[in-house]
C-alpha cells in the first residue's frame, strides 16, 4: 500500500478534567473511566482505530500528561492495541502544542502520514458510521485538505461549540461541506436558531490532515508554538516505552487549542477547511446529564450502575461503587457514590460540578485529585483504615510487577498475603510468601515486594509508626525510574 494513504491515529489523552467528579479526579480523569461500557474511554478510543481497505494503519500515537503515564501504559497493555509512540507532556499546554509535537514525531522517519486526531474521552455509539465519516475525511485530507468532523446535532445544546457549514462538496454520504465559521457555545435562543437553520453542526474536536500540512499551518499562524514545540521534540529523550518532551522548551509553548490557534484563523482568512458530518451517537460525556442521555435506561428512565434500588424514582442517574444506594421518590437527580465521596445533584445542573471541585481545591482536600484507591505503575493500593500511629492498606501488585527497593525512616510494615505469591526482599534475605503467610519489615530495613506470578498479588499491609505519609520513602532502585 502506498505511503500516500498511511494513516496515523493520534490520541490526545492529556486532559485532567473533573467534570464527572466524584468518579473522575485530577489524577484519574474521565478518559480512564469505564462509563460507557466495559472498556475505559481511552481503551474505546484505541479500539476505534481506522480500519479500511484503502488505508494502512500501523498502530497509534498517544500524547498524555507525565502524571498519567503509568495509567495510560497499563490501559494500553490491557487493551491489546498497538501504540508506536507514547509522548509525555511535562505540563499541559492545550491541544495545539500537543498536536504539533505529535506531527514532528510522526515525520521523524521521513513519512508524512494523514493524522486522525481524536480526543481520548469521547463516546461513539455507531462504529460503522464513525468509520464512514473518517474514510470520507481521509480522502479529503489525502488531497491536501484540512478536515474536521461536525456532529449532526440532536437538540439545541448550549454546552458545545458549533460549526457553520458552507457549500456542499458533492452528493456523497456522509455529507461534506466547506467550513464556514466556528461559533462559540451559544445561549439557548441562539442554539435554537442554529438548529432551525439546519446549517450548523456540533464541533467534535476531531481533526484529520497530513502532518506536513499541520506543521505548515502552525508555523504560519502561531510561530511561537511551532518553535517551542520543535525545540521540545529535538531536546526530548526516550525513556523506555515513553518519549519525554523537553520540559523547559515545552513550557514556553503558548497554551492554545487547535480551534483558536489554527482553525479559526484559517477559516477567517478565506482558505477554509472541510467539515464531514458525523451521525454516530457521539458524546463528549461533558457532564452527568450528558452521560444519562447516551446511556441505556430502565423502564423508569433511570440509569444505574452497581448495587442500586430505585423505588418510585424516575429520570435519575445513580452510580454505586462500594455500597447499596436506595432511592425513594426521587426525580432527575445524579447520585454518585464512591469509596470516599457522595454527590447528590439536580441532574440538569451537573455541568456546574466545577464549583464543588473549586471548593475542594480551596480546602486543599485530596478528594479533588485522588480516589481512595491510588494507582501506581506496579498496581494499586487502597487505605482500609487508619488511626493514631497505624494504617491498614489493601495492596494489589500486577503480574510480573515490583515495587521499588526502598526503606522507611518512621514506619514498620507487616504484610499478609491474601492471594497470589510474593517475593520479598528484606535486608540481605529474599524469600517467597504464599496465601495466608506473612512477614514483618522493621523500621529502617531495606525491602522490596515483587509479584513473580502470572496472576495479581493481593495482600494486606499494616503500617505502624510515628509518621505514615507517602513521602517517607527512600528509593534505592526502581524499574519505573521514579525519584
Image (cartoon, grey):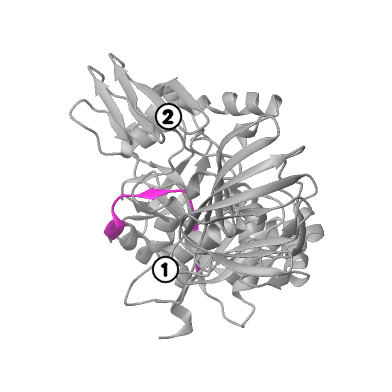
Residue 192 sits in which quadrant? top left
Query: Residue 466, how many percent across, how many down?
Result: 77, 37
* Nearer to us in this view, 58 or 323: 323
Using the image, determine if residue 311 lies above or below residue 18. Answer: above
x 75%, y 60%: residue = 446
Inspect this view and state whether residue 423 appears: yes
Residue 331 sits in which quadrant? top left
Magenta span: 115-129
Query: Residue 29, how many percent across, how many down?
Result: 54, 44
Q: Is residue 113 left or right of residue 222?
A: left
Q: Quadrant location of the N terminus?
A: bottom left
Badge number at residue 80: 1
Secondary structure, mark 2, is strand
Residue 444 highlighted magenta (yes or no):
no
* Nearer to us in this view, 35 or 147: 35
Residue 125 highlighted magenta (yes or no):
yes
Secondary structure, mark 1, is loop
Using the image, determine if residue 305 lies above or below residue 430. Answer: above
* Nearer to us in this view, 127 or 433: 433
x 64%, y 34%: residue = 366
Using the image, determine if residue 430 lies above or below residue 271. Answer: below
User: Reading the chain from its start, which is encountered first: label 2 or label 1?
Assistant: 1
Amino acid at each position: 500500500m502506498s505511503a500516500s494513504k498511511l494513516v496515523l491515529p493520534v490520541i490526545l489523552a492529556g486532559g485532567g478534567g473533573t467534570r464527572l467528579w466524584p468518579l473522575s479526579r485530577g489524577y484519574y480523569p474521565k478518559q480512564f473511566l469505564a462509563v460507557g461500557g466495559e472498556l475505559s474511554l481511552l481503551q474505546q478510543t484505541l479500539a476505534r482505530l481506522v480500519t479500511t481497505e484503502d488505508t494502512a494503519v500501523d498502530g497509534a500515537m498517544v500524547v498524555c500528561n507525565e502524571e498519567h503515564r503509568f495509567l495510560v501504559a497499563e490501559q494500553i497493555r490491557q487493551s491489546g492495541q498497538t501504540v508506536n509512540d507514547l509522548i509525555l507532556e511535562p505540563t499541559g499546554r492545550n491541544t495545539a502544542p500537543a498536536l504539533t509535537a505529535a506531527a514532528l514525531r510522526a515525520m521523524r522517519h521521513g513519512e508524512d502520514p494523514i493524522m486522525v486526531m481524536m480526543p481520548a474521552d469521547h463516546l461513539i455509539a455507531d462504529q460503522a458510521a464513525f468509520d464512514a465519516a473518517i474514510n470520507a475525511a481521509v480522502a479529503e485530507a489525502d488531497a491536501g485538505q484540512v478536515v474536521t468532523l461536525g456532529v449532526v446535532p440532536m437538540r439545541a445544546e448550549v454546552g458545545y461549540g458549533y460549526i457553520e457549514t458552507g457549500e456542499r462538496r458533492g452528493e456523497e454520504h456522509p455529507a461534506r461541506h466547506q467550513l464556514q465559521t466556528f461559533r462559540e457555545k451559544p445561549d439557548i435562543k441562539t442554539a435554537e436558531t442554529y438548529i432551525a437553520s439546519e446549517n450548523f453542526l456540533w464541533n467534535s474536536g476531531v481533526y484529520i490532515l497530513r502532518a506536513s500540512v499541520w506543521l505548515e499551518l502552525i508555523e504560519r499562524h502561531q510561530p511561537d508554538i511551532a518553535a517551542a514545540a520543535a525545540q521540545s521534540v529535538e531536546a526530548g529523550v526516550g525513556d523506555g516505552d515513553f518519549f519525554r518532551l523537553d520540559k523547559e522548551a515545552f513550557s514556553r509553548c503558548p497554551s492554545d487549542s487547535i480551534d483558536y490557534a489554527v482553525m479559526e484563523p484559517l477559516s477567517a482568512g478565506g482558505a477554509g477547511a472541510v467539515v464531514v458530518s458525523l451521525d454516530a451517537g457521539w458524546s463528549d460525556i461533558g457532564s452527568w446529564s450528558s452521560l444519562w442521555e447516551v446511556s441505556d435506561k430502565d423502564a423508569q428512565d433511570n440509569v444505574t450502575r452497581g448495587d442500586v434500588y430505585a423505588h418510585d424514582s424516575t429520570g435519575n442517574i445513580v452510580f454505586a461503587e462500594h455500597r447499596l444506594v436506595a432511592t425513594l421518590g426521587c426525580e432527575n437527580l445524579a447520585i454518585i457514590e464512591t469509596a470516599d465521596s457522595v454527590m447528590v445533584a439536580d441532574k440538569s445542573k451537573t455541568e456546574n460540578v466545577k464549583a464543588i471541585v473549586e471548593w475542594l481545591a480551596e480546602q486543599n482536600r485530596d478528594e479533588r485529585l485522588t480516589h481512595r484507591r491510588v494507582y501506581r505503575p506496579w498496581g494499586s493500593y487502597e487505605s482500609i483504615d487508619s488511626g493514631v500511629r497505624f494504617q491498614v492498606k489493601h495492596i494489589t501488585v500486577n503480574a510480573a510487577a515490583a515495587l521499588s527497593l526502598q526503606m522507611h525512616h518512621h514506619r514498620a510494615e507487616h504484610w499478609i498475603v491474601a492471594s497470589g505469591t510474593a517475593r520479598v526482599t528484606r535486608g540481605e534475605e529474599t524469600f517467597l510468601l504464599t496465601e495466608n503467610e506473612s512477614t514483618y519489615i522493621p523500621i529502617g530495613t531495606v525491602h522490596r515486594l515483587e509479584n513473580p506470578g502470572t496472576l495479581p498479588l493481593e495482600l494486606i499491609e499494616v503500617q505502624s509508626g510515628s509518621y505514615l505519609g507517602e513521602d517517607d520513602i527512600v528509593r534505592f532502585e526502581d524499574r519505573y525510574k521514579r525519584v
